[in-house]
Amino acid sequence: MNKLIAKEWLRAAHDDLLLISEIIDNESLTHLVAFHCQQAIEKSFKSILEYNNNNVPKRHDLLVLKDLVFNQIEIGNEDMLEALNSLYTESRYPGDLGLLPEGKPTTKDAEGFYSFARNIYAQAELQIKS
């Protein structure tokens, strides 16, 4: 197990969460909150994989990664994971891309994504720091 690399993945996830804490109240940036939530979860999953000596795929699909860590972490709200997964790539580009079916994520959506990402991160942190 490479604890150092696992901790680096976790530090990168923490940086995404730190950025979110700075922009969470800005209604114009909800799509970026969603993007960084996806990133924090992806990196948290990858920290668990690295910590447990599993192959860390060069994939960004949260559903694929979730299947690789399912026995080490409690996801809880898989719908939230699916929503963030669908927003990942498109959230970085202008126009109609990066939208939920009902449009740009609301502030309430962003807050829910942030809470969900913090929960996944906290679970990963417990494993890595133990």
Image (tube, helix red, strand yellow):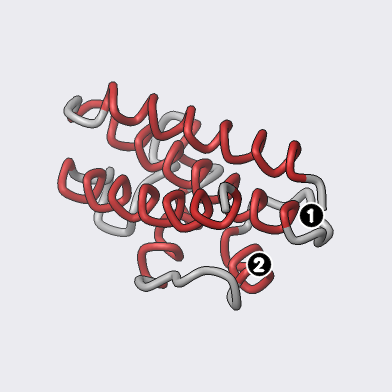
Q: 36 or 121: which is nearer to us?
A: 121
For the residue labelled by badge 2, is the local secondary structure a helix, a strand or a loop?
helix
- Rendered location of residue 88, percent (x, y): 51, 46
Mark 1 secondary-structure assignment: loop
Identify the amino acid type marked 2.
Val
Residue carrying label 2: 64
Q: Give the spatial CA distance, label 2 vs label 1.
A: 9 Å
* On screen, residue 33 above or below 41: above
Q: Is residue 60 left or right of residue 84?
A: right
Q: Are marks 2 and 1 in contact (CB under 8 Å)?
A: yes
Viewer-proximal residue among 125 and 83: 125
Horizontal side of residue 36 vs 65, given as left or right: left
The kind of residue tagged 1 is Pro
> What mark, if any, has residue 126 been given in the picture?
none
The image shows residue 104 at horizontal and vertical percentages of 28, 43
Which comes before the other along the chain, label 2 or label 1? 1
Left or right for 124, reference 117: right
Asked if 26 appears above or below 39 in the picture, the reply is above
* The quadrant where residue 116 appears: bottom left
- Around disc 2, counting alpha carbons within 10 Å, would you say few (fewer than 14), some (14 to 19), or many (20 or more)? few
> Exactly how many numbered labels are in the figure?
2
Q: Nearer the viewer, residue 65 or 101?
A: 65
**Residue 27 location, x and y as percent?**
18, 30
Q: Residue at x 17, y 41 (%)?
A: 107
Q: Residue at 71% across / 58% down in the picture?
A: 49
The residue most toward the bottom is 71
Give the numbered dot on residue 57. 1
Residue at x 65% of width, y 63% of height: 65
Instruction: Residue at 28%, 35% (x, y): give it.
Output: 30
Residue 6 percent coordinates (x, y): 69, 44
